[in-house]
Image: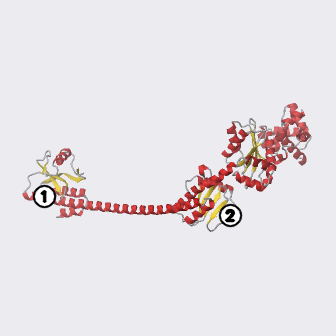
Amino acid sequence: MTLSSALFDTLDEGEILGLAMDHVAAAGPYGAEAGYLTVDGALVPSRRNGQVHALAVDRRVRELAGEDGPVTVPGLPRARALGLRGHERLHGYLVVTSRSRPTEAERSLLATLVRHTAAALSAAFAHRRRREDALELYRLREERTTLQGQLISVVAELGYQRALHALMADVAASGGGEEAITRALHGLTGLPALVEDRFGRLRSWTGPDRPDPYPEPDPVRQDAMLCAVGRQAGPVRVKDRLVTLVRPHGEILGVLALVDARREADDHTLRALEDGAASLAPELAHLRNLAEVESKLHRELADDLLTGTDEASAYARSEAVGHDLHRRHYVVVVQWSNRTADGSFAQTVGRAASAVGMHSLLTRRSDHVVLVADDRPHARALYEALARETGTRSGTIGVSAPCDSLADIPHRYQEAQRALEVRRHSRGEHYGTTFFDELGLYRILGPGNDYRELETFVHEWLGQLIDYDSRHHTAMVETLSQYFDCGGNYDETAESLAIHRSTLRYRLQRIRDISGNDLADVEDRLNLQVATRVWKIVLGEQAGERRR
């Protein structure tokens, strides 16, 4: 009875079989040779089974096919497989051996143990089935709940799609346009809707809380925002707005946005914004095509800006060609030694400018190409891009100071030419980019200046040194120039010339003796420094050759 209670207290089939095998000896002269459980229709040996006769016993038990029967175990004369049967199925086998012939009472006890074990296994298997049935019922209920939720979502989505299509049909019927799109989006989502051009200027707003005046866009932040939104798929949250780009064929034509300060937007709102952008794209593309039809005015506009034109007309024409003249501009002059300024080279310059992110109007003159750019060019980017395009680095670029108004552009064009000429006439590197606002003193040394007067000035102050260098193959002028470039610092000057400090001191004394000028005198020092700069940057060796 104690064993029976233990058998029914556990619901683990393996543990029940193990208890029966452990207590077989209590019923008589018995031993448990092996035990088996029926799992998914197959007999699975217990872990307690011995290994010596495992294969022979296994084979014989399976041959019994559910019936009780003798089992041959070498060394033991009596062995029998006893089926552990429930009401409807065989739960397993208990293989019992006996050392001697059991009495009738001992056989009865063994039979009782087998029945109790089978009953306990029936209870355990029934509990397992109930548990599995309960889990399956739970799974089916969860699946039903999920399907019901999906069905509700599908119905809601279909209803929303019908409403959206009806609204977009109304937009198409009314002729489309930016105002129709923002009106439809506001009506569908309840959020303020707006359209901006790619520069950040408002084109249409529907809904409350419109800023007045509308904030002037920051070009740097606007470009950064466009890049950030363009890198992601679908609408992107930018502060209190949901923003999507209108860009048919990859070109950004504008921005469509919803103001969602309370973050109320759901998936339907995002879908409406995407569909609105898809509907707006053909309209903005059409406007863009109209501008491209008039793109032949591109060069004429740049030409007029360089010579001076009416601002109102220039702004209107710039909008037609898709260029924002409201930004601060720079005039950039490009000249390449191995290329004539023809249409092909102008296209090359245009491609290079676009590749480095420059937005500009382009035209050409007899020996150079001119860009009216809406931002300060990078010090080397355009030059490097053109070097790659042309296959040579023998080019010069001059950049003007910034243009605060359109009326400044003609004068800035002259500054860009002056910067280019200073670079071309320099004794050092003739090629590269020169900015006018970085020339310092050399702003006065440009196209139109009388170089003969400059030569006279240089030879008035440096003529004796130039002649001395020519006769004795020395470098007195170069030493003096480097001395001024290093701010009069002996150590830096000696290091830059790769000479000893005492050698530098000797040369400076010889310069005083030869020229008759006092380096300690403020006036002499200023004139000598200007003369060396003019000699080094503008006149170079040409003056010395003429003098000789």
Q: Is residue 151 left or right of residue 131?
A: right
Q: Give residue 451's quadrant in the image.
A: top right
Q: Give residue 56's quadrant in the image.
A: top left
Q: Nearer the viewer, residue 435 or 299?
A: 299
The residue mark sitting in front, 1 or 2, is 2
Q: Nearer the viewer, residue 333 or 75?
A: 333
Q: Look at the numbered discs 1 and 2 and tell me whether their residues touch, using CB distance below 8 Å.
A: no
State the image coordinates of residue 232 (x, y, percent, origin top left): 56, 53
- What's the CA distance linking mark 1 and mark 2? 97 Å
Q: Is residue 365 left or right of residue 509?
A: left
Q: Is residue 250 left or right of residue 337?
A: left
Residue labelled with disc 1: 111
Amino acid type of the residue tagged 1 in the rendering: Ala
| Residue closest to the far bottom | 208
Q: Nearer the viewer, residue 162 or 145?
A: 162
Q: Give residue 210's quadrant in the image.
A: bottom right
- Residue 240 seen: no
State the image coordinates of residue 13 (x, y, percent, origin top left): 24, 57
Relative to residue 357, is residue 547 depicted above or below?
A: above
- Residue 379 seen: yes
Q: State the SS at label 2.
A: loop
Labelled disc at residue 229? none
Residue pictured at 65% horizontal, 53% vertical: 287
Is the C terminus in the top left, top right, bottom left or bottom right quadrant? top right
Amino acid type of the residue tagged 2 in the rendering: Tyr
Q: Residues within 10 Å of mark 1 (few under 14, many from 20)?
A: some
Residue labelled with disc 2: 214
Residue pictured at 18% horizontal, 64% vertical: 2
